[in-house]
């Protein structure tokens, strides 16, 4: 599954492409239950009651276009999720939303087809040589998979998550309210300026025009901590890869290029509107904080001690330790400090190396 990330001013927005196969299993085993674990035969409702993880809720202005309608904010059932993200169907009726997911041949199937076309006059040695060549060629080719949706994750700046973690219940509710309001603002921006579909049979990537859609259909899942068990207020907004074109009402797929290109802008927008909502609700102020060489300046809540934020940032400490090791190795080898670009690359490498594994099988 492809994953794009933008780090800006202390907030991370990521987009993960979710396939109909492995991506859907990731959705059930990680996003829906917050990197938890459940027996495959147990219903999500029982899991939520047992673990305290809040159920997903519906979001997006494309919801009224579904059969029978789906109310924004209503809880997402496992059957609805299976229909929409597993099969590209209406979550209520099960009717196809446009064309069914395409089926792509696996490497083994491609190899078998090519072997069947080999001449029957080949000797065993010749056949074995051709077979080895075919297997090598097909193994090196990526296997296409249908895209079921996009996991758009919006995470609050560290000071916001820190304040949320130590606040009383009433303040926590207000912080969550501001976070959800910012998410609504971001989705509105996506629907107004970014979400499009392509039509036409000719041109680049099989389309001649990019057209507007009626809205997106998405499910949102609130999580309150990171994989390292640090406080981290964030929400996965899983946008289905099914939209209706405004001009003809037909169901088609999203133009994924536009979504990926907008990650940085969405990160900036979320950070800005979240700051506004929190200031209006709680009357807090903000201050710029330097985060070290190779990292951008972060805007954090004034009065939230950096020491407390660091205490709740075990993942950040791990990343910095690995980054410092990479820098030291570079200085030893080259006799000079790395450039800002290399520092950024070292931190990305450290981020990947220190990423905790999920407790579930993906």
Image: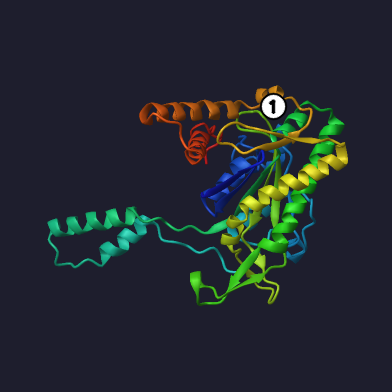
In depth, the one of 193 and 65 nearer the eye is 193
Image colouring:
rainbow
Quadrant location of residue 197? bottom right
Instruction: Give the residue drawn at x 50%, y 75%.
Output: 203
In depth, the one of 91 and 309 nearer the eye is 309
* Residue 93 can be seen, yes or no: no
* Residue 51 can be seen, yes or no: yes
Does 201 sit left or right of 236 as displayed?
A: left
In depth, the one of 9 and 188 nearer the eye is 9
Instruction: Give the residue drawn at x 22%, y 66%.
Output: 118
In the image, farthest residue toward the front: 336
Look at the picture and state if 187 lies above or below 14: below
Residue 239 in the image, given as x and y percentages of width and height: 65, 55
Circle 1 residues within 10 Å: few <14, some 14–19, many ≥20:
some
In depth, the one of 359 and 246 nearer the eye is 246
Q: How many marks?
A: 1
Q: Which residue is mark 1?
A: 309
Quadrant location of residue 41? top right
Residue 319 in the image, given as x and y percentages of width and height: 54, 30
Instruction: Give the residue drawn at x 66%, y 38%.
Output: 10
Residue 31 in the image, given as x and y percentages of width and height: 63, 43
Does 282 sit left or right of 294 as displayed?
A: right
SS assignment at label 1: helix
Residue 162 in the image, given as x and y percentages of width and height: 73, 29
Quadrant location of residue 271? top right
Does 123 sit left or right of 268 as displayed?
A: left
């Amino acid at each position: 599954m492809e994953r794009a990330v933008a780090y800006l001013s202390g907030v991370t927005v990521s987009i993960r492409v979710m396939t109909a196969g492995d991506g859907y299993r990731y959705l059930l085993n990680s996003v829906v239950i917050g990197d938890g674990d459940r027996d495959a035969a147990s219903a999500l409702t029982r899991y939520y009651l047992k673990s305290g993880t809040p159920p997903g809720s519906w979001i997006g202005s494309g919801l009224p276009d579904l059969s029978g309608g789906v109310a924004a904010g209503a809880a997402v059932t496992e059957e609805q999720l299976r229909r929409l993200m597993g099969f590209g169907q209406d979550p209520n009726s099960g009717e196809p939303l446009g064309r069914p997911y395409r089926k792509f041949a696996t490497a083994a199937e491609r190899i078998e087809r090519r072997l069947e076309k080999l001449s029957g006059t080949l000797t065993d040695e010749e056949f074995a040589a051709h077979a080895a060549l075919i297997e090598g060629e097909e193994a090196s080719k990526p296997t296409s998979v249908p895209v079921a949706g996009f996991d758009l994750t919006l995470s609050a700046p560290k000071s916001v998550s820190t304040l949320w973690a130590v606040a009383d219940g009433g303040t926590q509710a207000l912080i969550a309210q501001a976070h959800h309001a910012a998410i609504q603002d971001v989705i509105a921006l996506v629907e107004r300026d970014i979400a499009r579909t392509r039509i036409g049979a000719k041109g680049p990537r099989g389309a001649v025009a990019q057209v507007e859609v009626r809205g997106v259909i998405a499910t949102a899942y609130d999580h309150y901590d990171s994989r390292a068990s640090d406080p981290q207020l964030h929400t996965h907004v899983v946008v289905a890869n099914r939209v209706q074109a405004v001009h003809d009402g037909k169901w088609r797929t999203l133009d994924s290029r536009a979504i990926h290109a907008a990650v940085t802008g969405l990160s900036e927008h979320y950070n800005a509107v979240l700051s506004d909502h929190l200031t209006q609700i709680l009357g807090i102020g903000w201050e710029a904080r330097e985060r070290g060489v190779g990292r951008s300046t972060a805007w954090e809540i004034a009065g939230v001690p950096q020491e407390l934020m660091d205490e709740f940032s075990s993942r950040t400490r791990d990343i910095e330790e690995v980054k410092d090791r990479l820098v030291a190795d570079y200085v030893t080898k080259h006799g000079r400090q790395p450039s800002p670009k290399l520092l950024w690359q070292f931190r990305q490498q450290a981020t990947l190396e220190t990423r905790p594994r999920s407790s579930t099988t993906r």
